[in-house]
Amino acid sequence: MMPPLIPFLRRWFGYPPAASPWNSEAPIREELFSVERLEEHARSLAAAQPVTPKPTRGHPLAGRLAENAAVLRNCHRIIAQATEEGRAITPAAEWLLDNYHLVERQIHDIRSDLPSSYYRQLPKLADGPLAGYPQVLGVAWAFVAHTDSHFDSEMLCRYARAYQDVQPLTIGELWALAITLRIVLIENLRRVAESIVRNRAARQEADGVADRLLGVGGGAAEPAPAVLREYERAPLSEAFAVQLVYRLRDQDPMVTPALTWLDQRLVLQGTTTDAVVRDVHQRQGAASVTVRNIITSMRLISDVDWTELVESISLVDDVLAAGSAFPEMDFPTRNHYRGAIEALARGSDLTEIEIARRAVIAANAAANAEQDPADSRHADPGYYLVGGGRPAFEVMISFRPPARMRLGRLNRVFGIGGYATAVAMITAGLVALPLLALAAAGLGGAWLGLLGLLAAIPAVDVAVALVNRAATSCFGATLLPAMEFRQGIPAHLRTLVAVPTLLTKPEAIGEQIERLEVHYLASPDGELYFALLSDWVDAATEQAAGDETLLAAAVEGIARLNQRYGPAPGGDRFLLLHRRRVWNEGEGRWLGWERKRGKLHELNRLLRGATDTTFLSGNGLPPDVPADVRYVVTLDADTRLPRDTAHRLIGKMAHPLNRPRFDAGAGRIVEGHAVIQPRVTPSLPIGREGSLFQRTFSSMSGIDPYASAVSDVYQDLFDEGSYVGKGIYDVDAFEAALAGRVPDSTLLSHDLFEGVFARAGLASDIELVEEFPARYDVDALRHHRWARGDWQLLPWILGRGPTAGAGRTQSAIPAIGRWKMIDNLRRTLSAPAAVLALLGGLVLPLNAALVWASFVLATIVLPTLIPVVGAILPGRAGITPDSHLRALGGDIMLALTQSGLQVAFLAHQAWLMCDAIGRTLIRLFITRRHLLEWVTAAQTTVGPRLDFAGFYRRMASAPVIGVLALVVAWFAGSGTWPLAAALAVLWIASPAIARWASVSPLVAGRVSVSDADARTLRLTARRTWRFFESFISSADHMLPPDNFQEDPRPVVAHRTSPTNLGLYLLSAATARDFGWIGTTETIERLEATLETMSRLKRFRGHFYNWYDTRDLRP
């Protein structure tokens, strides 16, 4: 009973197998197979390797990897020491010595790319010498053994395909192929390196014996029996024997007894001297080839595109590609689908291939039964893997979600109500802490209750920050799937990039034209068009002086772009769509109808053939626009569109799971997204920008070249993001959801409102870049404008929002949209409530007032510090303590600076928000005027001078509130004057602080160069150009030589490098600037060199390091 139980327990609990694969010292080298023979072996191997039914912990590889790293480090040290001592080493040892840095990098990559959680999920072998180890390790081991460690991607693909003819590999195993190949190569290198060091030690020992026998080193020659006596019992190593033969052969006859003894010993060991010499030579050659192959393979494995390789051998990919548009999706989406299949397979009794097949079958069945052609999401397998069809699909495959997944899905049950409840409970708990402390001190009454209500408003900020932090930690970032248009945007997805702007002055128009050109250069391919949507500035009359001049400048600029870049397939690539002014009774001025909202609405109607818009045309007909435009990418005038961002946004919108479905009954988009908002990142400060205020409040800035999806609580929990006016929208779906929903002159801030009904999605893995104000007063005006726009939504929040006509009935705002709107209003009340709570606390006794003020100020500071607390531990492995502490210190300083400035500006923010709220409510319910009051970001930037008087004038409310704090403390008579004085000093000084924080660092003036330095620099430049002028000729294909040797004899090095080429091209342009050559000669030189460069061979588009200038060979 017991013996059969032992192997079972070994397999179940991961006990070591009877024969470990690490016991052998022989290199991992078997018969060398052709690719056809390798395929046959793969099939037989797959049939002979049983796999455990469920992934188990198995035997860890980390210990063996650490041991291999230590052995290789020691071998490298020994070999390096030998070279330092001037001793000869074998070619294999030279390979290891020269490339040890690469070996270290491979070991580091293995450790970082194979976490224990990933390793546990890999299927393990149930039997054989690798029992308990991953199946993919056995696959890699056999491949390395039968290719002598030579990596060839095509051979590996055919080998893996053949293996999967019998035993399919999981997605995780396919991705682990690269890691396990590295592991086996490191293991093989360790074995060969040990053999090299062991044989070197044996040869060194043989040299010592030969020295004693020959009397080398000044001593007398010793008799053979005395020297060889100690080697009588132990078998002789072949390396020892061969070295001894080399040293003693053809020497003094007195050593003949030693050679005779050696021959006899080898005969006793079953070999001969000649055979041993031959075998050792063969092994040295084989070791050299193996080490060379290992090092070369390590480089090739690092260079290969494993994404392409894995997808080419994935059977799951084959299933998905055969039944859907899966191959046309981008890599993150394809990987997202595969990840979902892995998770479903782990929680069910089906394999990954069976999961994929069932998803494709369900999609095909839905496609055949689809009634609405526009609703194609059900016909995509992703609908059942990552979309709305997943719950039903899980039931169909009997999926058993793990506990963490069940916990995470509670948001589906509770929705926004559960989110709001969590925020409310945490807020109540936070406010209760100081109230209970004050009550315990004997204070109470209605006054504390009122203070608690006031403090609850800013306390919500802390609660929201905590809930959001917990949500993002639990759920992670949600990825919006996307298509990938490798050949450019197709005609059926024709897209217009629209930039609303105002024609203010010729210089600004030139900047907008240039920025539109940059947008085009960032996305120049396919059916993509670019338009300026322009208005004149508001005026007292319909026509104002200078209007035609400004319009002519814009027309000329657009015409210049069309001439420079030519037309698109559907007409002019660049468009100017300019609107005439209309009278606005509420504003009492002539302006563009409904400003930006009206501009985009009229654009949508124009794209669908409307003839009654206010866009101007010279011939009485509607402006000429491309036909069948499906999407519009709308940007602000100061927004920058990074390279390929437009293509990626179109790919998001075009994916079946994101395509919007409009529900006429609900009056809004109920599935998919009619608008997708990318992440918006502040730009890096330029020139005189970069004030303390900008650096502090713009947070992370610049383009992240490795941008990936980041978490957003609304997108992650509810599949809805927040629209901020920059993104891409589906023209028809957007209009269906919003046309006629808002009456004229009632809504300034329309982005959030539009996003609610158009069901905005957030593409957090795509970035747009926009400018952030360098001055506090400019940013304050932005917040004032945003607050007015938020409070204009109050009628819709209350359910009494008007519509634009009888054709549109008012639809109920969904709960998530209403929460966003209410939360925006609550944020505008945070600063006023915090100031009132601080002033109200001044009537308490001093100790109680200090406790209360600390709590109120904490509600301002904590939302900034919570992300820093989450960053105390490194986010990933491999970060050095010094770099992490340095980054953490920077984050802490940034958070503390931001918190300090927020407290300093609190009084002004309170007054600013009260002013915005009061103005809006009066205009909304009483005057009905000036609801569209608006100033562009560019106009606010060109503001008053940056002086102390101006800041004190614009922020006069802050010192007034500071004085008010002193007055409250005086009349209260409770001894809180120290606290009041501290607040008063801070708020009275806040305009000066704002001015100080808004001042950009001084930019250094022109560098002063002395006459002597100028002469030296000019002489150096002239001699540099003299070198190129003398040695570049047609004989060298107009390529610069690397150098000219003067001594001992003149020699020109007829080779060049990319560095030399770049230096020459810059020198030629500079020589023309200095006047040493003419413009014509400069152009001829540059054209000749560039023409030659176009003929140079490259590696994946990159120039090689060196070229022969005479025959252009790399």
Image: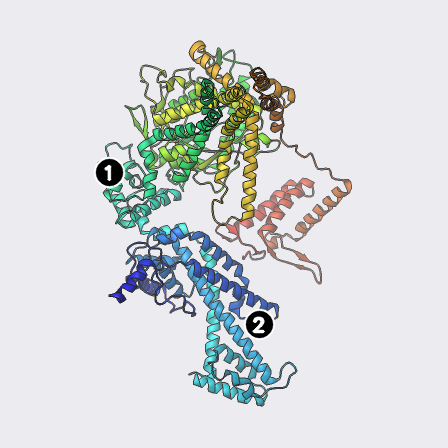
The x and y percentages for residue 54 are 30, 54
Residue that carries the numbered disc 1 in the rendered image: 366
State how many labels appear.
2
The answer to whether residue 956 is above or below residue 157 is above
Q: Which amino acid does label 1 sit on?
A: Ala
Query: Is 1075 positioned to the left or the right of 275 in the image?
Result: right
The answer to whether residue 66 is above or below residue 960 is below
Q: What residue type is labelled 2?
A: Ala
> Closest to the observer: 67 or 646?
67
Residue 208 in view in this figure: yes
The answer to whether residue 681 is above or below residue 601 is below
**Mark 1 or 2, nearer chain start:** 2
Residue that carries the numbered disc 2 in the rendered image: 88
The x and y percentages for residue 730 are 37, 29
Residue 1045 is drawn in which quadrant?
Answer: bottom right
Alpha carbon distance from label 1 to label 2: 73 Å
Which part of the image, by quadrant, shows the N terminus? bottom left
